[in-house]
Image (spheres, grey):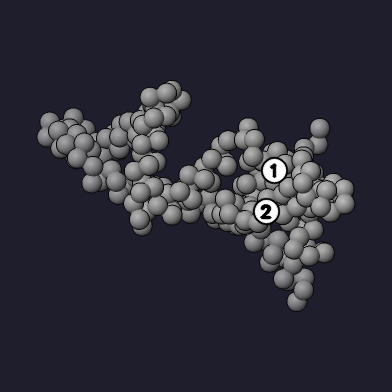
Amino acid sequence: MKKIKSLFATGLITVLPVLITINIMSWIFKFLNNYLRQNIFVKEMTSYLLKYEFYSKFTTQVLVYLIAMLIIILTIIIAGLAMRNVIGKKIAKKIDLLFSNIPLVKPIYTTILQIRHLMFTSNTKAYQKVVMIEYPRKGIYSLGFLTNRENQLFEEILGGKKLLNIFIPTSPNPTSGMFIMVEADTVKELDIKIEDAVKLIISGGAIVPKINKN
């Protein structure tokens, strides 16, 4: 029975990332498909091409969908380029402010913004290093982020013990968690990128960083 459980767990770990990826891609496809069906531009272009019988109905729909998808991709790329300049950043701030003031949308939107910031800001000064400590008790290990090596005030209070400031994030939302101060000799610093650690936390341990063999 134990062997069956072990094999099932191994199989689940192997299959789960594939199933999650397929489900996400399926959701994106359905979302885009529904959007394109209702889009006025798509409807008008399809009607125009069918009116003059340039192609068959199926070929026309495929062609229009491809053109619409290309426009969407180009729009996203242009938006990305725009966000890199001063004007684009100002527009982004106004959009963030708008959504952040809508009562029901605010908690969801702000959480997504915080996660996006953690995922794509690798040079953040707040998190200096990924660490591992025994927390909340012995035998249980937790990932954390080193936020400060200097803690003179509390070191003096505790008689000169070297302390490190650690932020322990929660899963699947790494923007919330616990701030703790830990003795330096109990902290294990890891050679893991901050964004990889964030992915690990968000996925609940499903996305494990690759080991650097160099």
Residue at position x 54%, y 40% from top? 117
Q: CA distance from mark 1 to mark 2?
A: 9 Å
* Image coordinates for residue 109, horizontal then vertical, percent: 42, 49
Snapshot quadrant of residue 94: top left
Which type of secondary structure does the marked residue at label 1 adopt? strand
Residue at position x 39%, y 34% from top? 92
Q: Is 105 on the left or on the right of 22, as rendered? A: left
The amino acid sitting under disc 1 is Thr
Judged from this view, the residue extending furthest toward the top is 85
* Image coordinates for residue 62, horizontal then vertical, percent: 30, 38
* Image coordinates for residue 102, horizontal then vertical, percent: 34, 51
Which type of secondary structure does the marked residue at label 2 adopt? strand
How many marks the image carries: the answer is 2
Q: Is 7 on the left or on the right of 63, as rendered? A: right
Residue at position x 87%, y 52% from top? 159
Query: On screen, 103 above or below 137?
Result: above
Is disc 1 in contact with disc 2, using a CB cutoff of under 8 Å? yes
Name the residue nearer the viewer: 96 or 32.
Answer: 96
Name the residue nearer the viewer: 23 or 60.
Answer: 23
Query: On screen, 49 above or below 14?
Result: above
Residue 210 visible: no
For marks 1 and 2 on the same chain, the one whose residue lies earlier in the sequence:
1
* Image coordinates for residue 158, horizontal then vertical, percent: 84, 54
Q: Which residue is mark 1?
A: 147
Badge 1: residue crowd in 10 Å (few <14, some 14–19, many ≥20): some
Q: Quadrant of the C terminus?
A: top right
Query: On screen, 205 above or below 91?
Result: below
Residue 100 visible: yes
Residue at position x 81%, y 36% from top? 213
Snapshot quadrant of residue 176: bottom right
Q: Which residue is mark 2?
A: 179
Badge 2: residue crowd in 10 Å (few <14, some 14–19, many ≥20): some
